Image (tube, coloured by chain):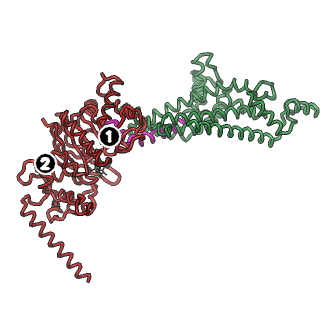
Amino acid sequence: MRLLEVQDLRVSFSTDDGIVEAVRGVSFDLDRSHTLGIVGESGSGKSVCTQTIVGLTRGATVTGNAFFDGVDLLTAQPDELRGIRGKRIGMIFQDPLSSLHPLYRIGWQIREMIQAHDSSMTRQQARTRAAELLGLVGIPHPEERLDDYPHQFSGGMRQRVMIAMAMALNPDLLVADEPTTALDVTVQAQVLAVMTRLQREFGTAIVLITHDLGVVAEVADDVVVMHAGVVMEHAPRRETFYHHHNPYTEGLFDSLPAVGAGRRRLTPIAGTPPSVIDLPPGCSFAPRCPYAFDRCWVSEPPLARVFGDVHHWSACWLPADLVARTAIRDRLRAETAAAGETAEGAAS
Amino acid sequence: MVRFLIVRTLTGLVVLWLISMSVFALFYVVPSNVARTLGGRQATPETIAAINERLGLDEPLWKQYASFVGDALQGDLGYDYYHQVPVTTIIAQAVPVTLSLAVGAAVIWLVLGITNGVISATHPRSLADRSLTAFALFFYSMPSFLLGLVLLYFLYFKLTQAGYAWFPPGGYAPLSEGVGPWVNHLLLPWATLALVSAAAYTRLTRGSMLDVLSEDYIRTARSKGISERRVTYRHALRSALTPIVTQFGIDLGQLVGGVLVTETVFSLPGLGQTAIIAITQQDLPVIIGIVLFASTAVVVANILVDLAYAVLDPRVRIS
Ligand SMILES: Nc1ncnc2c1ncn2[C@@H]1O[C@H](COP(=O)(O)OP(=O)(O)OP(=O)(O)O)[C@@H](O)[C@H]1O
Ligand code: SF4
Ligand SMILES: [Mg+2]
């Protein structure tokens, strides 16, 4: 049995501006000891998707299934869900500055989590464990820092506290939402190392949400690329990096800072991600896609196998055949260039 | 923190000094006829002068004030004009009544207001939320003297008329006579004083809780797998208390006015009623004594609230 199996997850919020369709049919699965990277621009539904799975999205309409070790988390009884949260699924949230309770000592906050699931632990044992965890994520003088309040820690340190807390009970699944964004590069590497050590030692599965393709390259086994609430491409890491099919994935890689030749520039995908309220028909990426053609504007491409690979899925109407794809790309490039020339000619 | 306390105490003393001066000045502006009242209709000018001399009223105002301050600093607030009872004794007799009324009412309104607010906030737009909101709006817009009279009319007058003499018409039964009579005499006054404020605190707690419940750290708390109850009370209410305590500090001053009205409506022989009687009789030492005592109480209570604030929020404590 797979550890986590998400099937056709849909999440929408009813707001004053209309229905926000934050997640529109997402499926993926994950085995023990594996890491799934989820990437995508801001607002693509990464956080909503993962938080909904553990029942932390409030005021939303949710459909689909999310089986965790055979239990559908979306329909589980509150008590059952409570027993899983924290103990079997650890969560690390995106914003370290606001994710810890400002009025409680961090030792108390970690202890609370431990003692909620392990009543045999005494206060002192839980405290010792909390200190051990802080040491594990690289916080100096962990014993003394237990009695500090969150505002006495820097953002990076608070993120480490969150990570320590999420890992306190050696969960089967760790959901980490941008765990390293607030950290500088060295610390980032340390934190990733701590997470992978946990994975090796306890067979923890990890869902890692990140903007950073470098982090994905380092730790992910599979990669899900999200855009406007749907999965655009889902493939093993190597495929994602070297044989991606989807123009959106291509755009993400093109937007990477170009290293070398003294240049380190970020060129984001042109245009803004679409609003997920009242989405028009067709492919959600069409307005920004350099390959968009007539079909893209009328119907939304389903997630389908590409390149004859059972593990490689992409939601795009472009042919999987590399030669045909390159031909289309070259033709479109030539057309844009020609259009540019005519515009210049008209201007002079 | 220590510096903060010293500053607060000093400003408190300045406030008390200003208040005592103002009360003195007010009395000077209003022509005094204490001696005439005491001496009776037939009193000769000589008698009046003698009375004025005995009470020290013939002295210039600044001298009267100076000797008052001198005595007050030694814990002597003078004697009342009419029966020569020490003002401190008068206050000591009235304090338990007012304290019972004020503390009991404050406890009731805080408990009621916070509980209702939490229920409203954790079940937004539910039937409970809507009815509690209606309750809050109803009492919020009601002046406390009106509420007192309404309670008295229905729960004392109408009930007694119908043969159920559950509540006394007013007055006070000291705690030494038993908890039952004490509560029985105070129930309606408590309700008068507490319901209006409880309504305000229901709204306040609801708003504060709703803000806190959408915080990221509440999501973290839920992700730990603790009970929803614990999330509500240990995590959310803990943060929501800060604005409530702030408001409570502000309301302490206004409580004085409410006590005055309630004691009058229910003939409770507390500080408020004593003060009002003293005012009608122009019994200066009693008025000043009570005003100073009440001001001191409010100043001290405010300092305590600020301390509570520091206890509640480590960020205040440490900085
Ligand atoms: N409670 C809510 N009510 C209404 N809309 C919401 C709510 N929560 C999220 N959304 C919307 O859902 C969409 C997806 O949000 P989500 O936070 O999942 O994006 P994300 O991929 O995590 O982005 P980021 O990289 O910035 O964290 C956004 O358009 C967001 O505005
Ligand atoms: S379906 Fe069309 S618009 Fe969408 S990504 Fe593919 S080519 Fe671009
Ligand atoms: Mg996010």
Q: Nearer the viewer, residue A276 or A177?
A: A177
The residue located at (34%, 30%) in the rendering is A111
The vertical placement of A345 against A129, above or below, is below
Chain containing the residue with disc 1: A
The vertical placement of B160 against A57, above or below, is above
Q: Is B147 left or right of B24, judged from the image as shown?
A: left
For the C terminus of chain A, the quadrant is: bottom left
Amino acid type for the residue under numbered disc 1: Arg
Amino acid type for the residue under numbered disc 2: Pro
The residue located at (13%, 55%) in the rendering is A244
Secondary structure beneath dot 2 equals strand
Q: Is A233 left or right of A185, judged from the image as shown?
A: left
The residue located at (67%, 27%) in the rendering is B270
Instruction: State which quadrant residue A285 falls in.
Output: bottom left
Question: Would you say residue B229 sits in the magenta stretch?
Answer: no
For chain B, the rendered hue is green
Return the residue found at the far bottom: A348
Residue placed under numbered mark 1 in the picture: A160
Instruction: State which quadrant residue A221 falls in.
Output: top left
Residue placed under numbered mark 2 in the picture: A236
What's drawn in magenta, residue-wise? B195-224
The vertical placement of A222 against B193, above or below, is below
Q: Which chain is red?
A: A
